[in-house]
Amino acid sequence: MRYLRFLLDYYRGDYTKTVAAYNAGEAAVDKYNGVPPFAETRNYVQRVGKNLKTARAQETNRPVQVADGAPPKSASGETPAPIRASVGSDGRVYYRTP
């Protein structure tokens, strides 16, 4: 996660370059000023983009039903562990599960 955060900061929020650099390395993305012409990297960027689009659409269309105030259940019927956020001494937000 730290490496992805680094890449996202390095490419100033450009998800395409971030994903390409995660696959091919920053040097390749910098050399080609974008997604390098490697078939593996281009396919990877396309797959990740498609999966992200699908996941965002599912989150938007997913109804949340919490009538009794209980946390929502996962697909397997289990209650997921809560996620706790804290701010570190470096000013970053850290997310943890117990």
Image (cartoon, helix red, strand yellow):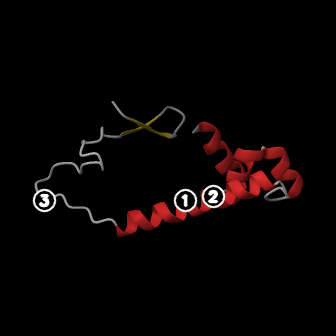
- Measuring from the top left, give residue 74's x and y in whole percent: 29, 48
The amino acid marked with disc number 3 is Ala
86 left or right, relative to 39: left
Q: Secondary structure at mark 3?
A: loop
Quadrant of res 58: bottom left
23 left or right, relative to 87: right
Q: Residue at x 83, y 54 (%)?
A: 38
25 left or right, relative to 31: left
Q: Residue at x 60, y 37 (%)?
A: 2
Residue 67's tag is: 3
Closest to the observer: 67 or 74? 74
The residue pinned by badge 1 equals: 51
- Measuring from the top left, give residue 23's x and y in whole percent: 72, 46
Residue 95 versus residue 58 in the image, above or below = above
Assess whether mark 1 and mark 2 are in contact (beta carbons under 8 angstroms). Answer: yes
Q: CA distance from mark 2 to mark 1?
A: 6 Å
The residue pinned by badge 2 equals: 47
Q: Residue at x 33, y 65 (%)?
A: 62
The quadrant of the rendering that contains the N terminus is top right
Q: CA distance from mark 3 to mark 2?
A: 36 Å
